[in-house]
Each structure stands twice: as C-alpha cells, then as structure tokens.
C-alpha cells in the first residue's frame, strides 16, 4: 500500500508526539489487518541543501521515525546538475546497504517534451 503523503493520515500537526503516535498506530493496524507492506511518502521541510538527507529531516515528530522499519531518502546532488541520489536512512533487522558512502545516483533530464530518468 502506498500512502502519498504522510499528512493524508491526519489533520493534526505531525510534529506533535500524540499525532505521530496515532499515525504509527494507523500504519501498524494496516499492516496487521491486511498483511501488507506500507510505503509512506513524507516530505522534508526546507533545509540546508549542502547537508545530506537523514531520517531526522522528515517533517514531524521523531516518533514517526521510531515506528518504521526502513527509511529511504531521495535527494538532489549539490555537485552534479540533474543528478539525484537514493540512500537508506534507517534499516531495522537487515544490513543498511545504501549509506552516505554508498548511494545510488541517477539523472533526470527533460529531453524534448519528455522527462527521462
């Protein structure tokens, strides 16, 4: 199941610990009831673009990060135009492969009328 965006699950402020706990409960119940994996998309607020993305950058309470098993960040390179990266910011129960020292990179460019990756 894909939930786009985190704020879809609440009208409250995701920085509030009680709201974050409620979101974690909703996701946990979905997983238990349906036996499905949940991909929850969350945006990061404006931040220093020279700093790499970390789990703590998710908009909201740190409790949001506590309730998840794996987190992946998608960020834009500061050094190479049109280049983006994928890195793991959390991995519970398995080895973290995509660390700050080992990220996947890809380009996104507009070629004619189409955006290509």
Image (cartoon, grey):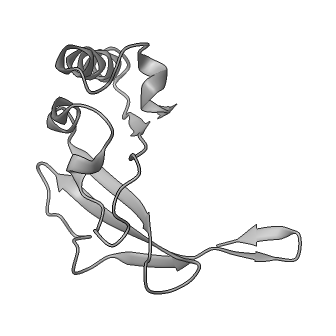
- Residue situated in front as seen by the camera: 6 or 15: 15
1 on left or right of 34: right
Q: Furthest residue to the right?
A: 113
Q: Tell me where residue 63 appears, x and y as whole percent.
A: 16, 30
Vertical comparison of 80 with 93: above or below: below
Tell me the residue at 21%/31% (across/down): 61
Q: Tell me where residue 79 appears, x and y as whole percent.
A: 43, 86
Vertical comparison of 105 with 61: above or below: below
Tell me the residue at 43%/19% (across/down): 9
90 on left or right of 73: left
Q: Quadrant of residue 34?
A: top left
Tell me the residue at 88%/76% (across/down): 112
Tell me the residue at 32%/25% (across/down): 14
**Quarter the C terminus occupies:** bottom right
Q: Tell me where residue 86 appears, x and y as whole percent.
A: 39, 67
34 on left or right of 88: right
Q: Quadrant of residue 85?
A: bottom left
Vertical comparison of 111 with 4: above or below: below
Vertical comparison of 9 with 96: above or below: above
Q: Tell me where residue 41 appears, x and y as whole percent.
A: 44, 40
- Residue situated in front as seen by the camera: 70 or 21: 21
* Numbered circles on residues, count: 0
60 on left or right of 116: left
Q: Furthest residue to the bottom?
A: 80
């Amino acid at each position: 199941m894909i939930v786009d965006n985190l704020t879809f699950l609440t009208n409250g402020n995701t920085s509030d610990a009680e709201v974050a706990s409620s979101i974690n409960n909703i996701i946990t119940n979905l997983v238990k009831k349906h036996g499905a994996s949940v991909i929850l998309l969350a945006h990061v607020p404006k931040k220093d673009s020279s700093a790499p993305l970390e789990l703590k950058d998710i908009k909201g309470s740190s409790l949001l990060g506590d309730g998840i098993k794996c987190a992946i960040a998608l960020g834009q390179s500061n050094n190479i135009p049109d280049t983006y990266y994928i890195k793991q910011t959390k991995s519970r129960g398995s080895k973290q492969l995509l660390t700050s020292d080992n990220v996947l990179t890809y380009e996104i460019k507009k070629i004619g009328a189409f955006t290509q990756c």
